[in-house]
Amino acid sequence: MIDVKQKRLFLGNDHGAIVIRPAVIQAAKLLGFEILDFGTDSVESVDYPCYAKKVCDALKDNAGIGILMCGTGIGVSIAANRYRHIRAALCHEEQEAQLARQHNNANVLCLGGRILTPEMAAKLTNLFLTSTFEGGRHQKRIDLIDTIDNLDDLTC
Ligand code: RB5
């Protein structure tokens, strides 16, 4: 269950994102988010699926929203989207971060530490955490995703 009003942010990252991590944390704190931090701030090489798992597991048991980061953002987004309760959006520019919430009701933002500047990472964090799901026709489409185990099962 996503409830951004709770202002609880679950954060996870590997070594590939330590350059943007402080900017993301600062942007979320400025918005008044409580941060539950599962990420690393070390350059020591670690495995991004383990960090995605920590955040996704936490989001199963708690209301809130997540941000996952790795070098490209791709690895954590692939891992996070294996979970049925997760809608993870890999974003590179402002409109994506906004629409991920407004249209897709994404509950995890994925960012690439080797792709984005800290300034852009902060901007995307801000937009993602302040945008609201629009519901309506978008809810119907999300419901369609939730009814399927396999895209082969979707008859449209
Ligand atoms: C780690 O070197 C790197 O592969 C990881 O951070 C991420 O980019 C994977 O998608």
Image (cartoon, rainbow, N blue to C red):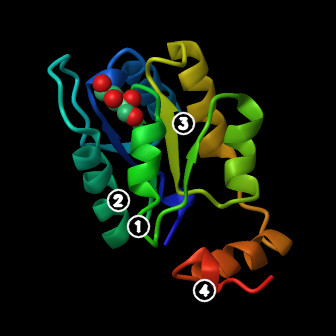
Residue type indicated by callout 3: Leu
Read off the residue under disc 3. 31
Earlier along the polypeptide chain: callout 2 or callout 1?
Answer: 2
Using the image as rendered, state which of residue 26 and residue 17 is in the foreground.
Answer: 17
Query: Relative to residue 32, is residue 84 depicted above or below?
Result: below
Circles 4 and 1 in contact, beta carbons < 8 Å: no
Left or right, 100 with reference to 150: right
Earlier along the polypeptide chain: callout 3 or callout 1?
Answer: 3
Q: Position of residue 78 (x, y in %)?
A: 45, 50
Residue appearing at x 35%, y 59% in the figure: 56
The C terminus lies in quadrant: bottom right
Read off the residue under disc 1. 83
Number of residues whose C-alpha sits closer than 10 Å to that of mark 2, classed few (under 14), some (14–19) or many (20 or more):
many
Local secondary structure at mark 2? helix
Q: Distance from label 2 to label 4 (Cα)? A: 20 Å
Viewer-side label of 2, 4: 4
Q: Position of residue 147 (x, y in %)?
A: 60, 86
Residue appearing at x 46%, y 28% in the figure: 72
Earlier along the polypeptide chain: callout 2 or callout 4?
Answer: 2
Local secondary structure at mark 4? loop
Q: Distance from label 3 to label 4 (Cα)? A: 34 Å
Viewer-side label of 2, 1: 1
Read off the residue under disc 2. 56
Circles 2 and 1 in contact, beta carbons < 8 Å: yes
Q: Distance from label 2 to label 3 (Cα)? A: 22 Å
